[in-house]
Image (cartoon, helix red, strand yellow):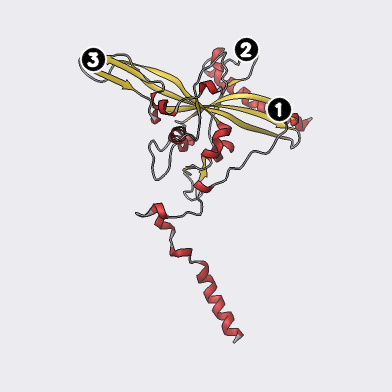
Amino acid sequence: MKTIVKTLLMVLLPLLGFTQEGNVRFTDQYGPFYSTYQQDNDFANRKLIAYPFVREADVMWKKITWEIIDLREKMNHPIYYPIDTLHERKSLVMALADGIKSGELFAFRPSFKNNAFEFNQDNIIIPDSLTDLDKNVIVWPNNTLVQRWKPEEITQILVKEVWYFDRKTSQLNSEIIGLCLIREYRKYLGPPTEQGFPMDSIPRMNYLFWIYYPDAREYLSKIPVYNPYNNTALYSFDDLFVNRKFKSYFVREANVYNDRLITDYVTGRAAQLESEKIKKEIFDYEQDLWEN
Protein backbone atom coordinates (compact mmCIF):
# COMPACT_ATOMS: atom_id res chain seq x y z
CA MET A 1 0.00 0.00 0.00
CA LYS A 2 2.81 2.41 0.88
CA THR A 3 4.44 1.66 -2.44
CA ILE A 4 1.24 2.55 -4.32
CA VAL A 5 0.88 5.85 -2.41
CA LYS A 6 4.48 6.83 -3.10
CA THR A 7 4.03 6.03 -6.79
CA LEU A 8 0.89 8.18 -7.03
CA LEU A 9 2.61 11.10 -5.30
CA MET A 10 5.57 10.90 -7.66
CA VAL A 11 3.19 11.06 -10.64
CA LEU A 12 0.73 13.70 -9.37
CA LEU A 13 3.07 16.20 -7.69
CA PRO A 14 4.83 17.26 -10.92
CA LEU A 15 1.44 17.72 -12.59
CA LEU A 16 0.16 19.87 -9.72
CA GLY A 17 3.29 21.99 -9.91
CA PHE A 18 2.59 22.95 -13.50
CA THR A 19 -1.04 23.99 -12.94
CA GLN A 20 -1.88 27.65 -12.28
CA GLU A 21 -4.42 28.96 -9.85
CA GLY A 22 -7.75 29.51 -11.59
CA ASN A 23 -6.52 27.77 -14.75
CA VAL A 24 -5.23 31.09 -16.14
CA ARG A 25 -2.43 30.96 -18.67
CA PHE A 26 0.09 33.78 -19.05
CA THR A 27 -0.99 34.28 -22.69
CA ASP A 28 -4.41 35.50 -21.47
CA GLN A 29 -2.81 38.88 -20.83
CA TYR A 30 -2.73 39.41 -24.61
CA GLY A 31 -6.42 38.55 -25.13
CA PRO A 32 -9.55 40.74 -25.20
CA PHE A 33 -9.95 40.50 -21.40
CA TYR A 34 -6.38 41.50 -20.60
CA SER A 35 -7.59 44.08 -18.07
CA THR A 36 -8.77 41.30 -15.72
CA TYR A 37 -5.46 39.41 -15.88
CA GLN A 38 -3.46 39.61 -12.66
CA GLN A 39 0.27 39.52 -13.30
CA ASP A 40 2.70 38.26 -10.69
CA ASN A 41 4.92 41.24 -11.52
CA ASP A 42 2.20 43.82 -10.91
CA PHE A 43 3.77 47.29 -11.02
CA ALA A 44 0.67 48.96 -9.58
CA ASN A 45 1.35 47.27 -6.24
CA ARG A 46 5.10 47.77 -6.21
CA LYS A 47 6.78 49.19 -3.14
CA LEU A 48 9.46 51.84 -3.39
CA ILE A 49 12.93 50.79 -2.28
CA ALA A 50 14.10 53.74 -0.21
CA TYR A 51 17.63 55.05 -0.29
CA PRO A 52 19.78 53.98 2.67
CA PHE A 53 19.88 56.61 5.39
CA VAL A 54 23.03 58.72 5.28
CA ARG A 55 23.94 61.16 8.03
CA GLU A 56 25.30 64.52 6.98
CA ALA A 57 28.27 63.92 9.26
CA ASP A 58 29.17 60.78 7.27
CA VAL A 59 29.39 62.66 3.95
CA MET A 60 33.08 63.50 3.79
CA TRP A 61 33.01 64.64 0.14
CA LYS A 62 30.36 65.65 -2.40
CA LYS A 63 30.03 67.27 -5.81
CA ILE A 64 26.92 68.54 -7.61
CA THR A 65 26.83 67.91 -11.35
CA TRP A 66 24.50 68.30 -14.31
CA GLU A 67 24.29 65.68 -17.07
CA ILE A 68 22.48 65.41 -20.39
CA ILE A 69 20.65 62.22 -21.36
CA ASP A 70 20.30 62.28 -25.15
CA LEU A 71 17.18 60.25 -25.95
CA ARG A 72 18.39 59.70 -29.51
CA GLU A 73 21.11 57.40 -28.18
CA LYS A 74 20.22 53.74 -28.69
CA MET A 75 20.74 52.88 -25.03
CA ASN A 76 18.24 55.62 -24.04
CA HIS A 77 15.46 54.55 -26.42
CA PRO A 78 13.46 52.82 -23.62
CA ILE A 79 13.08 56.30 -22.08
CA TYR A 80 11.94 57.95 -25.33
CA TYR A 81 9.61 55.27 -26.71
CA PRO A 82 6.74 54.63 -27.15
CA ILE A 83 5.68 58.05 -28.44
CA ASP A 84 2.09 57.22 -27.49
CA THR A 85 0.78 54.74 -24.90
CA LEU A 86 1.32 51.21 -26.26
CA HIS A 87 0.28 47.99 -24.48
CA GLU A 88 0.03 49.96 -21.21
CA ARG A 89 3.64 51.14 -21.68
CA LYS A 90 4.51 54.83 -21.58
CA SER A 91 7.52 56.91 -22.37
CA LEU A 92 9.02 58.95 -19.54
CA VAL A 93 7.57 62.15 -21.01
CA MET A 94 4.03 60.73 -21.15
CA ALA A 95 4.39 59.26 -17.66
CA LEU A 96 5.48 62.60 -16.19
CA ALA A 97 2.74 64.49 -18.03
CA ASP A 98 0.07 62.07 -16.74
CA GLY A 99 1.43 62.33 -13.21
CA ILE A 100 1.36 66.14 -13.29
CA LYS A 101 -2.20 66.25 -14.67
CA SER A 102 -3.41 63.79 -12.01
CA GLY A 103 -1.77 65.78 -9.22
CA GLU A 104 0.66 62.99 -8.24
CA LEU A 105 3.67 65.05 -9.36
CA PHE A 106 4.63 68.72 -9.21
CA ALA A 107 6.31 70.45 -12.13
CA PHE A 108 8.45 73.56 -11.66
CA ARG A 109 9.18 76.37 -14.09
CA PRO A 110 12.78 76.36 -15.32
CA SER A 111 13.66 79.82 -14.04
CA PHE A 112 17.44 80.01 -13.88
CA LYS A 113 19.31 82.57 -11.82
CA ASN A 114 23.11 82.70 -12.00
CA ASN A 115 23.01 79.31 -13.76
CA ALA A 116 21.33 77.78 -10.68
CA PHE A 117 17.83 76.52 -10.07
CA GLU A 118 15.91 76.08 -6.85
CA PHE A 119 12.74 74.05 -6.37
CA ASN A 120 10.69 76.95 -5.07
CA GLN A 121 6.96 76.65 -4.42
CA ASP A 122 6.46 79.89 -6.34
CA ASN A 123 7.61 78.08 -9.49
CA ILE A 124 5.03 75.26 -9.35
CA ILE A 125 3.15 74.86 -12.63
CA ILE A 126 -0.64 74.56 -12.59
CA PRO A 127 -1.55 71.15 -14.14
CA ASP A 128 -4.14 72.69 -16.47
CA SER A 129 -1.47 74.91 -18.03
CA LEU A 130 0.94 72.06 -18.80
CA THR A 131 0.02 71.84 -22.48
CA ASP A 132 0.44 75.61 -22.89
CA LEU A 133 4.07 75.64 -21.77
CA ASP A 134 6.40 77.23 -24.31
CA LYS A 135 3.55 77.66 -26.82
CA ASN A 136 3.90 79.81 -29.92
CA VAL A 137 0.84 81.69 -31.23
CA ILE A 138 0.77 83.08 -34.76
CA VAL A 139 -2.16 85.25 -35.85
CA TRP A 140 -2.97 86.36 -39.38
CA PRO A 141 -6.22 87.57 -41.01
CA ASN A 142 -9.08 85.14 -40.38
CA ASN A 143 -6.83 82.47 -38.88
CA THR A 144 -4.71 81.57 -35.85
CA LEU A 145 -2.05 78.93 -35.38
CA VAL A 146 -1.04 77.67 -31.92
CA GLN A 147 2.17 75.67 -31.79
CA ARG A 148 2.33 73.49 -28.65
CA TRP A 149 4.96 71.05 -27.44
CA LYS A 150 4.71 67.39 -28.39
CA PRO A 151 6.18 64.33 -26.59
CA GLU A 152 8.36 63.45 -29.58
CA GLU A 153 10.00 66.91 -29.39
CA ILE A 154 11.56 66.07 -26.00
CA THR A 155 14.94 64.77 -27.14
CA GLN A 156 17.10 65.46 -24.09
CA ILE A 157 16.82 65.33 -20.31
CA LEU A 158 18.94 67.47 -18.01
CA VAL A 159 19.78 65.58 -14.82
CA LYS A 160 20.92 67.37 -11.67
CA GLU A 161 22.51 65.03 -9.13
CA VAL A 162 24.83 64.93 -6.18
CA TRP A 163 27.80 62.57 -5.89
CA TYR A 164 29.02 61.87 -2.38
CA PHE A 165 31.38 59.59 -0.48
CA ASP A 166 29.90 57.88 2.58
CA ARG A 167 32.72 57.23 5.01
CA LYS A 168 30.54 54.89 7.08
CA THR A 169 30.13 52.42 4.21
CA SER A 170 33.26 53.57 2.31
CA GLN A 171 31.24 53.91 -0.90
CA LEU A 172 30.87 56.50 -3.61
CA ASN A 173 27.17 57.03 -4.30
CA SER A 174 25.00 59.35 -6.36
CA GLU A 175 21.43 60.56 -5.97
CA ILE A 176 19.37 62.41 -8.55
CA ILE A 177 17.96 65.75 -7.43
CA GLY A 178 15.91 66.77 -10.44
CA LEU A 179 14.99 66.05 -14.06
CA CYS A 180 14.40 68.77 -16.65
CA LEU A 181 12.83 68.03 -20.03
CA ILE A 182 14.48 69.76 -23.00
CA ARG A 183 12.43 70.49 -26.11
CA GLU A 184 14.00 70.69 -29.56
CA TYR A 185 11.76 71.94 -32.35
CA ARG A 186 11.41 74.42 -35.19
CA LYS A 187 9.60 77.59 -34.17
CA TYR A 188 7.35 79.12 -36.79
CA LEU A 189 8.11 82.78 -37.44
CA GLY A 190 4.99 83.88 -39.25
CA PRO A 191 1.90 82.84 -41.22
CA PRO A 192 2.11 80.46 -44.18
CA THR A 193 3.64 81.80 -47.35
CA GLU A 194 1.90 81.96 -50.69
CA GLN A 195 3.06 78.42 -51.31
CA GLY A 196 1.48 77.35 -48.01
CA PHE A 197 3.38 75.05 -45.67
CA PRO A 198 6.14 74.66 -44.66
CA MET A 199 6.35 78.03 -42.97
CA ASP A 200 9.52 79.97 -42.20
CA SER A 201 11.02 78.60 -39.01
CA ILE A 202 14.17 78.50 -36.89
CA PRO A 203 15.54 75.70 -34.67
CA ARG A 204 14.97 76.24 -30.96
CA MET A 205 15.93 74.44 -27.76
CA ASN A 206 14.04 75.27 -24.56
CA TYR A 207 13.83 73.93 -21.04
CA LEU A 208 10.22 72.80 -20.50
CA PHE A 209 9.87 72.00 -16.78
CA TRP A 210 11.68 70.48 -13.80
CA ILE A 211 10.65 67.49 -11.69
CA TYR A 212 11.96 67.11 -8.13
CA TYR A 213 13.09 63.50 -8.36
CA PRO A 214 12.94 62.38 -4.67
CA ASP A 215 9.21 63.20 -4.65
CA ALA A 216 8.67 61.46 -8.01
CA ARG A 217 10.34 58.17 -7.10
CA GLU A 218 7.25 56.48 -5.68
CA TYR A 219 5.21 57.39 -8.76
CA LEU A 220 7.92 56.31 -11.24
CA SER A 221 8.49 53.02 -9.37
CA LYS A 222 5.04 51.86 -10.54
CA ILE A 223 5.60 52.51 -14.27
CA PRO A 224 7.31 49.72 -16.24
CA VAL A 225 10.07 50.27 -18.77
CA TYR A 226 10.49 48.10 -21.84
CA ASN A 227 13.39 45.68 -21.55
CA PRO A 228 14.79 45.05 -25.05
CA TYR A 229 16.67 41.94 -23.89
CA ASN A 230 13.87 40.17 -21.99
CA ASN A 231 10.19 41.14 -22.11
CA THR A 232 9.52 39.24 -18.88
CA ALA A 233 12.15 40.92 -16.72
CA LEU A 234 10.67 44.41 -16.71
CA TYR A 235 11.90 47.18 -14.47
CA SER A 236 10.55 50.59 -13.53
CA PHE A 237 11.68 54.10 -14.42
CA ASP A 238 12.92 54.47 -10.86
CA ASP A 239 15.05 51.33 -11.28
CA LEU A 240 16.41 52.79 -14.50
CA PHE A 241 17.54 56.07 -12.91
CA VAL A 242 18.72 54.71 -9.56
CA ASN A 243 20.79 51.97 -11.24
CA ARG A 244 21.94 54.40 -13.96
CA LYS A 245 20.77 52.29 -16.89
CA PHE A 246 21.22 55.20 -19.27
CA LYS A 247 23.96 56.91 -21.22
CA SER A 248 24.81 60.53 -20.43
CA TYR A 249 27.57 63.13 -20.44
CA PHE A 250 28.44 65.95 -18.05
CA VAL A 251 27.65 69.53 -19.06
CA ARG A 252 28.27 71.34 -15.76
CA GLU A 253 29.66 70.95 -12.27
CA ALA A 254 29.44 73.11 -9.19
CA ASN A 255 32.26 75.64 -9.48
CA VAL A 256 33.37 79.07 -8.31
CA TYR A 257 32.36 80.70 -11.61
CA ASN A 258 28.59 80.78 -10.94
CA ASP A 259 28.35 77.07 -11.82
CA ARG A 260 28.96 77.95 -15.45
CA LEU A 261 28.36 75.49 -18.28
CA ILE A 262 31.28 73.73 -19.96
CA THR A 263 30.29 75.38 -23.24
CA ASP A 264 30.70 78.80 -21.62
CA TYR A 265 34.48 78.46 -21.77
CA VAL A 266 35.28 75.66 -24.26
CA THR A 267 33.59 74.24 -27.36
CA GLY A 268 33.84 71.29 -29.71
CA ARG A 269 36.29 68.53 -28.89
CA ALA A 270 37.60 70.48 -25.90
CA ALA A 271 34.10 70.41 -24.36
CA GLN A 272 33.96 66.62 -24.72
CA LEU A 273 37.33 66.26 -23.04
CA GLU A 274 36.22 68.57 -20.22
CA SER A 275 33.13 66.40 -19.70
CA GLU A 276 35.29 63.30 -19.47
CA LYS A 277 37.58 65.13 -17.06
CA ILE A 278 34.69 65.74 -14.64
CA LYS A 279 33.75 62.07 -14.82
CA LYS A 280 37.33 60.97 -14.21
CA GLU A 281 37.74 63.30 -11.22
CA ILE A 282 34.66 61.81 -9.55
CA PHE A 283 35.70 58.19 -9.91
CA ASP A 284 39.38 58.88 -9.25
CA TYR A 285 38.46 60.34 -5.87
CA GLU A 286 37.23 56.95 -4.64
CA GLN A 287 40.17 55.09 -6.16
CA ASP A 288 42.70 57.47 -4.61
CA LEU A 289 41.22 56.89 -1.16
CA TRP A 290 41.84 53.17 -1.44
CA GLU A 291 45.35 53.67 -2.74
CA ASN A 292 46.27 55.91 0.16
In screen coordinates, is 137 left or right of 290? left
Query: Which residue in the structure is indicated by mark 1?
Result: 285
Residue type at mark 2?
A: Tyr
Q: Which residue is drawn at 27% across and 18% down?
A: 144
Quadrant (top left/top right/bottom left/bottom right) for the C terminus: top right
Q: Can residue 133 be seen in this view?
A: yes
Mark toward the start of the polypeptide (3 vs 2): 3
Mark toward the start of the polypeptide (2 vs 1): 2
Looking at the rendered image, the disc whose residue lies closer to the viewer, 3 or 1, is: 3
Q: Where is residue 188 in the image (x, y as percent from the top left)?
A: 32, 17
Query: Which residue in the structure is indicated by mark 2?
Result: 257
Q: Residue at x 28, y 15 (%)?
A: 139
Q: Is residue 109 above or below residue 42?
A: above
Q: Position of residue 18 (x, y in %)?
A: 50, 66
Classify 10 Å Cα crowding around label 1: few (below 14), some (14-19), many (20 and above).
few
Q: Which residue is drawn at 55% across and 13% down?
A: 264
